[in-house]
Structure formats: structure tokens, C-alpha cells
Amino acid sequence: MSETILITGAAGQLGQRVIHHLLETCKVPAASLIAASRDTSKLADLAAKGVATRKADFDDAASLEEAFEGVDRVLLISTDALAVPGLRLKQHTTAVAAAVKAGVKHIAYTSMPSPDKSLVTFAPDHLGTETAIKASGLPYTIIRNAWYLDNYMHSMPHNLQGGSWYTASGDGKVPNISREDCAMGAAAALASGTTESATYTLTGSQSLNADQIAAIISDVAGKPLAAVQVNDEQLNQGMLGAGLPDFVATMLVSADANIRAGNFDHVTTDFNRLTGKQPQTLKEFFVAHKAALTA
Ligand SMILES: NC(=O)c1ccc[n+]([C@@H]2O[C@H](COP(=O)([O-])OP(=O)(O)OC[C@H]3O[C@@H](n4cnc5c(N)ncnc54)[C@H](OP(=O)(O)O)[C@@H]3O)[C@@H](O)[C@H]2O)c1
């Protein structure tokens, strides 16, 4: 009997794709998987494939202890609770404590690159969670996902309409990776059955600055796009003016500052080591999403 692997956040975009790759790419039997979510009604497709489903809410310690019962390996997908300072770290440490209490043998967690050296507002959540996992004494796999390529799809269709991308990233470079590749990497790490502790940083194979990214997007879309450098305050005001909530604007400004400082500029081969594949390039990603990019 193979070990039992539980994935939290299974209704989320990453969670869905991790389970897809566990089943289809890594050939893990559905009977070895448990999909956990705050809302199990969103997991009907997985249940139909023979994947067990359980309720797991990081705001509800009792639900976590119950969900983790009899589980060998758990993937804790970081939550999106950024609006309330301190909440996400509390959620994550609650989940780590529940995993220990339930007798889970191995904890995996989706983190961010170099959380100990980052200007991004939510870096302390990831650093604190990694620290709690290491302090738990359990073997762990920390999967530090670089900035998703998918994040650009929020703004680039609009930017292409005006031909300008306002950024405060300066000449800083970032090795984006697709969410899909992060999911494939996490699935490979989970399916490996490792009993060792390891930290992987999943990045794309190229680190690019804003001018290079704009040129590639412009080429794929067949429309002009210029990266226009602004300062942090201008970027913040622009995003607030566009209707983004304060905490989101502050977070995005901090992300650009982190790129500008060179803190994201680190390409790894960890995706290749885990999957035996090359990550999708920025150009390949936008070619695949051209219809939505130019809609
Ligand atoms: N690297 C990047 O660029 C990047 C970009 C966006 C997000 N992220 C991080 O990566 C995570 C997964 O990304 P995604 O693309 O799948 O985002 P998403 O589709 O927005 O998913 C949000 C996730 O948070 C989970 N969640 C929220 N509140 C929770 C709670 N109280 N208890 C348990 N789980 C909770 C959701 O699980 P259920 O709905 O199933 O309960 C879901 O899996 C995000 O939550 C965020 O931490 C990284």
C-alpha cells in the first residue's frame, strides 16, 4: 500500500493542478490521495475520480486535526489571507501544529524565494512558516515558488491597450515560472516518497528585466508595449486609482522593490531536477495565452 498524501487548498488553482499532476504525470493512484478544502463541494470532480475529500480550514484547528488523521504526507498550500496582518502566519502555524498532532510523517509547504532576504510585505509569513516547520522536527519539503507568469495576465491585457506598463522594478530581473510548472514540481516532490528534508526554489530558466519582458509580450501580442519606470509612490497611487485595495497595492509595490533590489534575480535548476523537464519560458507562456492577452 503506497503512502497517503493530502493536499490542502485543493479547490484553489494550484491545488487542482498539483492533484492533476499527481494523478496523470506521477501516476499516483487516486486511492492514495486526499483532497482537502474549506469547501468540499468544490471537489466533486476529484471525488468522481476516486480521490477522497475532506474539509480542512486553517482557521479551524479541529477541522485540520481531523483532516490529517491517518495521513503520511501533507502539502500545505499557503493561503491567500493577506488582508489581515498576521492572519496567514497564524493559519499556517495552526496547520503545522495539527500535522504534528495527527502524526503526519512529512510536511511539504509552498513558500517564496529567499523569504529571509525579501522586501515583499508577506515574506515574514513564509519565513515564519518555514521556521515553524523546521522546529516541528518532522522531515520537510519546502517548495519556494517564484513569481507566477500567470500574475501578468491580471494587468498585461489592459497594459497592451494603452501600450504602457507602469513598473517600479527598474533594471531588476525576475525568473518567473508558470503556476502549472509549480504544480508539476510540487507533485513530483510529493510523489518522490523522500524521507529527507529539502528546500527547492522553482524558477523559470531565464531571469528578465521589465524591458525584456515587455518586448516579448509586445512581440507575441503584435502590439506595442513599453515598460515605463515610475517610483514607488507613483506606482502605489496608480494602483489605488485603478481601484486595487490598499494592501494589494502595497504588496505589489513591495514586489517591484524586491525585483529592483535584485532579490528575485536567482535562476535555479530545481524544477528540472524534480521533473526532468524544462520550465515553460515567458514567450511560450504568452503564446499559449495569446487569446486572453489580446482580448
Ligand atoms: N508565486 C506566486 O506568484 C503566487 C501568486 C498567487 C498566490 N500565491 C500563493 O500560492 C497559493 C496558491 O496559489 P493559487 O494560484 O492556487 O491561488 P488561489 O487559486 O487564489 O487559491 C487560494 C488558496 O488558498 C487556500 N485557502 C484560503 N484560505 C484558506 C483557509 N482558511 N484554510 C485553508 N486553505 C485556505 C484555498 O483553499 P480552498 O479554497 O480549497 O480552501 C486555495 O487553495 C496562494 O494561496 C498564495 O499563498 C503565489
Image (cartoon, helix red, strand yellow):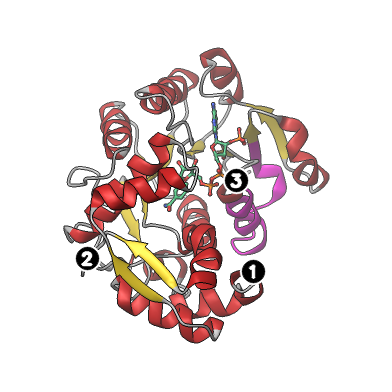
Query: Is residue 143 rendered to the left or right of residue 188?
Result: left
| Marker disc for residue 2 | 3
Labels 3 and 2: the sequence-earlier one: 3
Q: Amino acid at mark 2?
A: Gly
Query: Residue 200 in the image: x percent, y percent?
Result: 33, 55
3 or 2: mark nearer the eye: 2
Whether residue 281 is visible here, answered yes or no, is no
Q: Which residue is mark 1?
A: 292
Question: Considering the numbered disc 1 on the image, is that residue within a helix, a strand or a loop?
Answer: helix
Work out whether residue 108 or residue 227 is closer to the camera in this orientation and state it: 227
| Residues under numbered marks 1 and 2 in contact, where contact means CB atoms less than 8 Å apart | no
Tell me what residue is drawn at x 49 percent, y 50 percent.
190
Give the vertical position of 219 relative to 193 (above or below).
below
Label 1, label 3: how far apart the Cα atoms are = 40 Å
Give the vertical position of 221 relative to 229 (above or below).
below
Question: Considering the numbered disc 3 on the image, is that residue within a helix, a strand or a loop?
Answer: loop
Total marks shown come to 3
Question: Which quarter of the image is occupied by the N terminus?
Answer: top right
